[in-house]
Every structure is written in C-alpha cells, then in structure tokens.
Image (cartoon, rainbow, N blue to C red):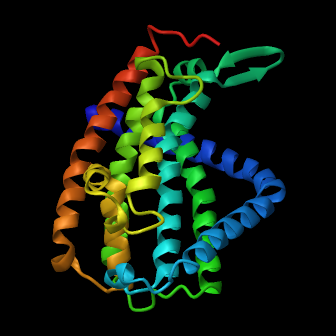
C-alpha cells in the first residue's frame, strides 16, 4: 500500500511538474522576443569592459601563470560561473514568493496559488522545481553568450579536463543551492518576504569581492582570503579553472574538492530542512501585503 501511494505521489509530481514547466516555457517566448536581444548586448558589453580593463593592467601578469597565464579565459570562466551561482542563490526564494503570493483566477473568482495547490493535492515541490528549472534555461543562454564573447577575445579551453570541471561545478551548485534554500526559508521564518533578503545579499556581495570571479585570490589581503575560504563559489571556480585551463585532475585538486564537498554536505541538508520547516509555517502564518 505504501509503495502504491509513493508511486501515485511520484506520478502526480511528474504530471504537474511538466505542466508548470511547459507553461513557463510558453511564457518564455515573450522573454526571447522582448528581453533577450538587450540581454545579449548587456552581457557582451559587460564582459568586454572587464576584458579591456584587465588588458590595460598587464594582461600577462605572473599572477595568472597558475591558471595558464590567460587573463581572458580566467575572466570568462568566472563570469559564466558567477552568473550560474547568482541565479541559484535567488531561484528558490523568487519561486517561493511567486507561489505564496500568486493568484489563480476563473469566472471572477481568485484563489492564492498556495491554496490552489493544497486543494488540488498538487505537491508544493512540483511548481517550485518547474519555476527553478525554467530559470536555468535562461542561465544556460547567458552562459552561452559569455562563451561566444570569450571566443571573440581568445578564450582557450581546448585541452581541459572537462569531467573534473563539471564535477566541481555540480558540487558547487549543490552547496549554493543549500544557501538559496536557507535564503528562501527566511520568507516565513523571519518574514523576509519583501525587499532584500540579507543572506543571499551578503553572499552575493562577498562572492564578487573575495571568491575570485574577476581576479585571482592571491591579490587579496590575508583577512579577505580567509573569508573567501568559507564560500563554496571560491572552490568551485578554482576547480573549474584549473581543470579547464591547466588540465588538472582529482589528484591535484583533492584538497579543493574535499573542502567543497564538506561545505555542500552541510549547507544542502540544512537548506532542505529549513525550507521544509518554513513551508510548514505557512499553515500558521500569513504574508501581509
């Protein structure tokens, strides 16, 4: 009986996940038509600005030698991963707010999306993950744009260790998703449903400064380098860069992998637990507009 109920819940989740995902993909048409062209220009000009800025300060600086001595490749990989991880930080919070504050209407009657899910027996995770996955489609487009811009300026990753780089990116994604879930849980736990959420804001500010997005960590004072060691983005970017630009394998990157895996093993379960608790609080708390 329990197995049958589990199968039924999985089938219900799968059906509604794809329903919400297809709806969002249909709505994505408007983003492609009215926003994507401007998005492309913004990303290309932004990347170009950083590249020309770096070239003006001794492109072949010795500090980039450990990353293959290629500033352009170093920067483009940082921009690509930072875009991916920044979206992950906000994805669950934005999707949760959409579900909790969204409305479903018919024949002049309106119902909150959360109440609609409860009355319909639809798992909360179905629309949540559908919205998050849909957003990753936009992120993949952004990453591709950065990649194309990098090729124009001389991006070189031909001899890289792709499996190790991908593994590092995925473990980093798991850790950052944990932070994102913790951030989303603050909506109901502390009432951070409007304006800036402090946890994701702090992580994004620190990431841009100390995790090595735009420049190597070695240029930072030791105090800031100590802060960088707490952020999973630091290790994920270092792994991806050394694997792709220097061809390093697990044997050379084991220390970074160990630290990143340790952080992910703490943040992701903690994020899931806090998020589930925060959704349970919705039953007894109300968001006030």
**Label tally:** 0
- For residue 99, above or below residue 227: above
Quick one: 79 or 95, which is closer to the camera? 79
Q: Quadrant of residue 52?
A: bottom right
Quarter that holds the C terminus: top right
- Answer yes or no: is residue 104 visible: yes
Quarter that holds the N terminus: top left
**Residue 255, position as x, y percentages in the image:** 16, 67
**Residue 223, position as x, y percentages in the image:** 27, 51
Give the residue at x 40% y 37%: 181
- For residue 35, above or below residue 239: above
Give the residue at x 73% y 66%: 40
- Answer yes or no: is residue 8 visible: no
Instruction: Give the side of residue 98 with respect to residue 35, left or right.
Output: left
Give the residue at x 50% y 83%: 59
**Residue 97, position as x, y percentages in the image:** 57, 28
Instruction: Give the side of residue 58 with respect to residue 23, left or right.
Output: left
Quick one: 1 or 167, which is closer to the camera? 167
Give the residue at x 45% y 63%: 213
- For residue 132, above or below residue 119: below
Instruction: Give the side of residue 266 with respect to residue 237, left or right.
Output: left
- For residue 117, above or below residue 257: above
Q: Residue furthest bottom?
A: 159
**Residue 263, position as x, y percentages in the image:** 24, 49
């Amino acid at each position: 009986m329990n197995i049958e109920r589990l199968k039924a819940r999985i089938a219900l989740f799968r059906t509604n996940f794809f329903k919400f995902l297809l709806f969002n993909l249909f709505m994505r048409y408007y983003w492609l038509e009215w926003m994507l062209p401007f998005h492309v220009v913004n990303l290309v000009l932004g990347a170009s600005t950083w590249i020309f800025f770096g070239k003006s300060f001794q492109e072949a600086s010795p500090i980039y030698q450990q990353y293959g001595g290629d500033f352009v490749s170093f920067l483009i990989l940082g921009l690509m991963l930072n875009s991916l991880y920044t979206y992950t930080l906000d994805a669950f919070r934005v999707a949760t707010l959409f579900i909790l504050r969204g409305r479903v209407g018919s024949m002049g009657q309106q119902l909150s999306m959360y109440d609609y899910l409860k009355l319909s027996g639809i798992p909360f995770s179905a629309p949540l993950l559908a919205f998050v996955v849909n957003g990753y489609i936009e992120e993949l487009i952004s990453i591709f744009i950065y990649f194309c811009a990098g090729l124009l300026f001389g991006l070189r990753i031909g001899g890289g260790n792709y499996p190790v780089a991908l593994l590092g990116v995925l473990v980093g994604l798991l850790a950052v998703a944990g932070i994102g879930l913790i951030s989303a849980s603050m909506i109901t736990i502390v009432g951070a449903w409007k304006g800036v959420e402090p946890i994701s804001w702090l992580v994004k500010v620190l990431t841009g400064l100390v995790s090595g997005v735009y420049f190597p960590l070695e240029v930072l004072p030791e105090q800031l380098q100590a802060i960088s060691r707490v952020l999973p983005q630091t290790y994920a970017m270092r792994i991806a860069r050394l694997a792709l630009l220097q061809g390093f394998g697990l044997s050379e990157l084991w220390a970074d992998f160990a630290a990143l895996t340790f952080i992910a093993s703490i943040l992701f379960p903690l994020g899931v637990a806090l998020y589930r608790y925060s959704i349970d609080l919705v039953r007894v708390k109300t968001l006030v507009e």
